[in-house]
Image (cartoon, rainbow, N blue to C red):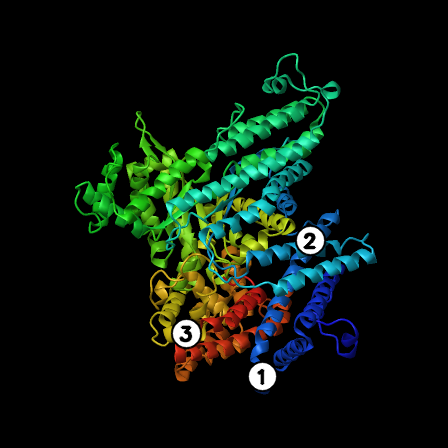
Amino acid sequence: MQRSGDEHNKREETEALFEESRGSDSESALRRDIRILGNLLGDVIVSQCGPEIFDEVEKVRAAAKDLRKLGTEACREKFRKTIREIPAQHRQEVIRAFALYFQLVNLAEQSHRIRRKREYERSTGSRPQRGSLLSAFAKIKRAGMEAPELQSLIHQLGVELVLTAHPTEAMRRTVLDKHQSMALILEKFDDPSVTSREMKAYTRELKAEIVSLWQTRNVRKERLTVLDEVRNGLYFLDEVLFDVLPAIHMEMEEQLQALYPEQEWEVPTFLRFGSWMGGDRDGNPYVTAELTMQTLVLHFDLAMRKYEAEILALGQDLSQSFERTGASAELMESLELPSDCVPDEPYRAKVDQILARLQATKARYHGEVVLGGITSYSGPAEFLADVRLLERSLLTHKGQEIAEVKVKPLIRQIELFGFHMATLDIRQHSEVHEAALEELFRRARLGGYADCTEEEKITRLSGLLEDRRPLVSPHVELGAGTQETLDVFHAVRRGQQLFGADCIQNYLISMSQGVSDLLEVLLLAKEAGLFQWREDGTVASGLNIVPLFETIEDLRAAPEIVDVLFANPVYRAQVQARGDLQEIMLGYSDSNKDGGYLTSNWELYKSQKAIHRVAERYGVKLKFFHGRGGALGRGGGPIERSILAQPPEAMQGKVKITEQGEVISQRYSHPGIAMRSLESAVSSVLLASLNVQTAYMQDTERRWSEMMEELSQASFEAYQNFVYRNEDFLPYFHQATPIDVIGELNLGSRPAKRRNSLRIQDLRAIPWVFSWTQNRHLLPAWFGFGKAMSSELKRNPESLREFRRMYQFWPFFQAMIDNIQMALAKADMLIAAEYVRLVEDQELAERVFGKIQEEYERTKRVVLEITGEQGILANAPVIQESIRLRNPYVDPLSYLQVLLLEELRQTRREDGDAAGDIDDVLLTINGISSGLRNTG
């Protein structure tokens, strides 16, 4: 943060965040962008708040740098004193300054990623960028794969990314919009043709945006509603993904054509987005059947608006005269004009007809009267047929280039987005279904249900599913909860009838712990007509039933549950009706909270392998749905690393992954970043699909798996003993983290807890991880690994050689170690120690923190022994340097957060009401999130 002008010349120039870095021209451009943004922020602080606030910020920043440079107790006390001496009336502005600085730095880094991608693409003849499609296809060709085999692989591909309503985005949509505007301005700085006058104008625009950011409330004053979340999710589909997804498919075709020119390539639409926003009702009382229908309407309206805009633009482009180019007979016939009436511009006439039908479709769906006898589209297939008719006529009348550039992207968009934009998943807790069926059984005079054994439940449910009759009459009056549960299934059917079968495809069951949990949902689906027996004895099904295995216990039980499930004749008929494909969701968050990082990852890995073996016996294909969060403790980290770390047999070309919270905006708020992120995901799935193990590799993995099993058990015991069997832990967690105020951050519509309880078991995994990130412990992302590994190395020192081989040759183990490295680098015991002061019982605090420090150092030590490096993240110097240089700017926010939490809790103890005092704490949470990134 710097001030320009005369005063700037009188004082020592403030260092930009990456000013110490040295490197290529592109890195110089990054330093330039950060310097410009920092200088402008300094000017804005002075103009908006006065020089005294700027001087306060500079004093804090200088003290933070000294603390990091020297690390002495004297420096620590001096820094505490500097923080305490900030006048109360200045605190909020100081916090805003550091928080906004990180927003600007993150923006500059985003622009830098786009810049580097363009540099790779301009450098012909050089190695393709890691994670690009070109890189993946080049590896595939070097491996000797022929075009027909690759074509077969591509036709098996299925990549689905699901935007979830999980509330880890601490930044408002308004703020993200301003970031988008600033990103577009920064891109202009790289244009070599920009004049100095234009550069000054762009700089003024940037400063205006920074002023606007400064004057905008960073954290939400009101909690988001579910429909707010839906609209936020649709923003990315509207502004970025609607154009980027077709571009990915078209780029794939171009790359393939260049590498394999002997074959004509057509890539199927394999990359899609789904959503949970408006469908995820697990623990969220605000997601009702009515709201789900409102969500589908919002999706539909956006699709109509996008298509209308595309068709209007197409009308401007397709100006061909009939006299000069002609048109196909089918196109002319489709216009339904008298034979003697030949329009001079038939393509435009067809476009006008398509536009009128789209508008009639929208009117019909909203119950409005359609005038003029215009026929609406019954679904996206009819709309697509009309656009393909345009394409065929252009291709046969010398308009190949126009068809390729103007019409083909629209065809892709219709194939990808239909009339629903993104497939909405429905999710509900298994207990809700059981409660509904308890009432339905009693109303049907079948006796009680909930108290039955699992075997009894399976038998009774199977019998009722085989019966074609409904369980109860639709005229029976039911309790509100049961009626709402049934209404959801009726809403699914109604939505599919209105907007197409793809609008909702999956019903996910949280806490699936037995076969009955799935059969219950199937029976409720039958009540709504989503599961029906045909006359020939086969099943017609409109819904995939998806179990979600979340806890360690559930992951271990999952293979047996799936075995019993597929052996059930009724459920096997359901799977057959859905193309012999079963989707299974795996929960990263709760399994980590339950058993720690190492055990969670290992149980997820071996559960996939075991479930796959079961499915293979029954001839069922699997699609694993990975419920990853943004934070490392919730399965976060680079998506390509996660994909390549999965068991080879579990991929089969299909993968589904959640995209949550701040990760959505980081990856999909800018077309260039979205393109890069999606390329990386797709190329990883392609390469992972080729990963077929030899017999030798299988033998090696079996040996390594035995080692992992022992490590996992030791880690599980260490984690459970510390978190769940340690009476000191709970008070430490509630006092040494900001968990008590995170629920007031208005991150999302869903409550932070499943039940009104202080127990960790009842806390949702998101605030659990978020809290440990804020206080720089990052405990869920590494605790337990060090003790397990060091015990094994002490027992058998020779095993170190094998662990090093595992790190070198086993993608699963490598990903786990590298993610732990990232967590250790972002964790900081220097800052974590400050939060220890918040614990009322300091003896208890020292006991707990002492164990955390001991395990942290132990984990660092064993990780370095395995990697053979001199320091954490030494094999990723760019990330290592980024964290090092960010720390002095995060530290003031952490120290301020500790001070503010002390004061807030003291005030609440004294008068019981200090709602107005929380704003500054929430600002620090927002700022630390921006500084560390991937926090939820």
Tag 1 secondary structure: loop
The amino acid type, in three-letter code, at marker 1 is Glu
Q: Nearer the viewer, residue 37 or 365?
A: 365
169 vs 27, left or right, is left
Relative height, residue 581 to residue 866 (above, below)? above
Q: Quadrant of the N terminus?
A: bottom right
Residue 216: percent from left, percent from top: 59, 63
Q: Gap in Å between the C-alphas at discs 1 and 3?
A: 25 Å
The answer to whether marks 1 and 3 mark residues whose Cβ atoms lie closer than 8 Å is no
142 vs 219, left or right, is right
State the residue position of label 1: 85
State the residue position of label 3: 913
Q: Earlier in the sequence, mark 1 or mark 3?
A: 1
894 vs 503, left or right, is right
Q: Gap in Å between the C-alphas at discs 2 and 3?
A: 44 Å
Q: Nearer the viewer, residue 505 or 442?
A: 442
Q: Earlier in the sequence, mark 2 or mark 3?
A: 2
Residue at 59 percent of width and 18 percent of height = 336
State the residue position of label 2: 184
Q: Gap in Å between the C-alphas at discs 1 and 2?
A: 40 Å
Residue at 30 percent of width and 25 percent of height = 535
**1 vs 2, front mark:** 1
**2 vs 3, front mark:** 3
The amino acid type, in three-letter code, at marker 2 is Leu
Q: Earlier in the sequence, mark 1 or mark 2?
A: 1
Residue 722: percent from left, percent from top: 38, 72
